[in-house]
Image (tube, helix red, strand yellow):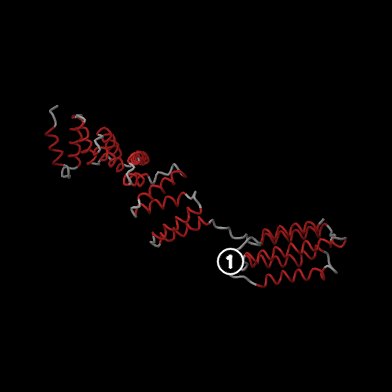
Amino acid sequence: MVVEVWVDIVVILTMILLPVLMVKMALLSTTLVMVEAAEQAQSFLKERTLADYYEEILMGALTLAWADAQRGRLDEQQAQRVRDTVSEIVEDLEVHKDSKNARSAPEEEGALNKLEQLEKAAPPPPPKVDPGVAAYNEGVELIQKGDKDGAEKKFDEAVAAKPDLAQAWKVISQLAYERKDYAKALSSGRKLLELDAKDGDLYGILMDSASKTGDNAAALDYKKKFVAANADNPEVNYNAGVESYTAGDYNGATASFAKAVQLKPDMANAYFWMGMSEYNQKSYGASRRDFQKYLELAPQGDQADNAKKMLEALPAK
């Protein structure tokens, strides 16, 4: 029956068009119109049908309420008052379901079309912003303004509200590392990797933070991952070679320097230290070749004199 259809439509429309809105200002007019709609019901139904009342009076009041909600003029209490008023009206008017309420199919179709037009015309309610995302966005704005301390606090709020916000953990780790808070940089970076194991951007920070907090095993593990994640970066391979050489791992150093010159053939210093690594492994032929290559690329380089001395010190072929 069309009246029942209208009852369902009005109730559904109320739930759709009046989501809970937390705003500062509100208009008394909306509440007054809803009260007036309730007061008009009995007198209106003496001459007209219940379906007419829903269409002409109640829908008009709901339209006004919807418009006020979209303008941010209804707070939660007022929105609930509108819901309650509509529910009371619908419940009170159930007794008026009689023969006067019957309408022809064309009239029913016209009323439903009008409701459909109203729903299409009304803009959707603004989406609710996740508190974690909102705090993250505020942090980004503070970063852009140069307020890193304030930004870090916002990012902390973001992950407190939304612990799976990987990007926030990433920025927290970077900011903490800049402040030399290596413990926080390490813990935040580890949280990022728990959420996104493929994100290797922080391996360098994690490697250094682990080293500075005394976790040498973790530092070595992150170093390997850092180099693997940057396998095509000649500078990373060169630095890895220097670290291996300093640690006495001449075989590992040779491999890293070889990779560096493969990626960047004119990296003179890589040839020098590769020659030193090979010398310590007693690979004199390879060492001679690399010292000569260094002098070819950088005859006036910082290591030129040392390269010449090493060539003189090498055993004869």
Q: Along the horizontal axis of the image, is 294 left or right of 219?
A: left
Residue 32, quarter of the rendered image: bottom right
Q: Quadrant of the N terminus?
A: bottom right
Q: Residues within 10 Å of mark 1 (few under 14, many from 20)?
A: few
- Give the residue at the far front of this rendering: 214
Query: Which residue is denoted by mark 1 in the rendering?
Result: 23
Q: Residue at x 67, y 63 (%)?
A: 80
Query: How far across and how far down the image is residue 152, in percent?
Result: 41, 57
Amino acid at pointer 1: Val
Position of 118 relative to 212 (above/below): below
Q: Please identify the quarter of the rendering in which residue 273 is found.
A: top left
Q: Is residue 71 left or right of residue 240?
A: right
Residue 209 vs 151, above or below: the answer is above
Q: Position of residue 173 (x, y in %)?
A: 39, 51
Q: How many marks?
A: 1
163 on left or right of 93: left
Vertical arrangement, residue 253 with respect to residue 31, above or below: above
Q: Residue at position x 43%, y 58% from top?
A: 153
**Which quadrant is home to the C terminus?**
top left
Please tell me which residue is depicted at 79% across the width and 68% down the height of the picture.
41
Q: Position of residue 103 (x, y in %)?
A: 84, 60
Instruction: Name which residue lies at 73% across and 59% down.
Output: 11
